[in-house]
Amino acid sequence: MAGLVNRLTMGGLALSIGLCFVVRSAVVAAHGQHEHLLSRQTLAKCQYDDDCMKNAYCWNQETCLCKDNYIAYKNRTHVECLRVANAIGDPCEKDIQCHVTFAPYSECRQSICQCSDGSHYEEGRCYKSVGLGLPCQTHRNCYIKDSYCVTGFCACTLRYHPNPRNDGCIPSLELGDKCSNDYECVTENSRCVGNCSCKVDHVLSSDGKRCLKVSNSVGEPCQEDSQCQLFQLETECGTSGKCSCIEGYHQRGSICLRDRFLNERCETHRECITDTYGNSNSTDVMNVDCINGFCTCASDYIMAEELYDCIRYSDNGKIGVPPDFVKQQCFSRATTAAVSWQRLLQGLALLFFARFSILMLITVERVSNTCCSTEAESFHFMAIKSTGKNLLSLHGHNMIKKARLNTSQWTLNQQPVLLNLTKSCNNNNNDSKSKIH
């Protein structure tokens, strides 16, 4: 039951819609017929057809109407019925004969119906001619072949584009298509070289549908690696959308150079980097330089404890210490070290000569106690002993030199005496032993 009710309801709705269309069509037809009668009405009163002008008849014994395919033309003096033109080129006397069929953009020129200047004939009517890019009301306004009215403006149809003069639509050729002129290639920044391809300063995108501008230096905008690598292979399009150096390379100015760390070989300071000095738009020497073919800390910088960076003196805790002062201190320390070594050698020399003198004194003492029998010999040994003691009192740098000379001279001068005294002592000892026996 419910289904039957639904069907009846839907049927009633369809019938109502149908009736609406019928009534509307009838109204439109009646309105058109009324306008047609008005265009034929002459406003002349009559009772018979003979009362009316040529090509008219008396309608309802009231007024004269032009016959079918005729139209009433009124001027200040009289009214006449003129034949309506059915095709372009039909004979005419007045513009109104053309307007009925071909719309207002037609005219009677040279006694025939034609489209007026600035209009064109399209599908039985004359339409205002609208060029590419100009406002339009209908597709028929767009007179250029392969154009149509879109969003109120005439434009070329799909896969077509305007020619350089903007008076025609030509096929749009994509990258790789055969072509004869550059303007046939529609891809931005493309040209025709037998087929559509990218311009010299552009590269083909990875999808083959775009021409991307080549980047001429590190830091320029990019979308793909190929834009950067055309001018330098050691680059890539970074995440920031700019050309950057690949791993193992760094930026110096507008190019990329291989990384060279401290103490590595180099040809120019631009190759050298540290932990804190990598990519840079500048090409000047910063905290690292190339000296004698090796990356070394630049002037006013010293190597950090980790040996991977160069820092200023102030950054190393020596605030306000100028480089010249540091050099002076280093020279002073070197001089102090040299003097210390010299004094050490002098001290060792003094110790050696002092020990030698003591040994000589001990020897003289033993000889004196053992074998000196005469007063003259004892006196001579005392002189030698006194000379040895004087040697021990020598000190200072200049005195050591004098001690060396005195010791050598003393040793040479006293050596015969010691030998003679030793021989004499030996003889005395032998005599004593023989007496005892």
Image: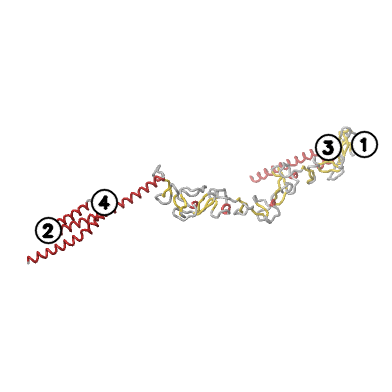
Spatial distance from mark 4 to mark 3, Cα to Cα? 150 Å
Please say if the residues under marks 3 and 2 sit with CB atoms less than 8 Å apart. no
Looking at the rendered structure, the secondary structure element under dot 4 is helix
Q: Residues within 10 Å of mark 4 (few under 14, many from 20)?
A: some
- Circles 1, 4 touching at the beta carbon (< 8 Å): no
Per the model, the C-alpha gap separating discs 3 and 2 is 184 Å
Dots 4, 3 in contact, CB < 8 A: no
Q: Nearer the viewer, mark 1 or mark 3?
A: 3
Under mark 3, the amino acid is Ser
In percent of width and height, residue 383 lies at 17, 55
Q: Would you name the residue on which mark 4 appears?
A: 399
Q: Residue furthest front?
A: 376
Q: CA distance from mark 1 to mark 4?
A: 170 Å
Q: Residues within 10 Å of mark 2 (few under 14, many from 20)?
A: few
Label 3: which residue?
Answer: 39
The numbered mark, 1 or 3, whose residue comes first in the sequence reads: 3
**Element carrying mark 1:** helix
**Closer to the eye: label 1 or 4:** 4
What separation in Å lies between label 2 and label 4 (alpha carbons)?
A: 36 Å
Mark 2 and mark 1 lie on one chain; the one further toward the N terminus is 1
Q: Which residue is mark 2?
A: 374
Residue closer to the observer: 58 or 264: 264
Query: Residue 286 placed where, x, y %?
Result: 47, 47
Q: Which residue is mark 1?
A: 50
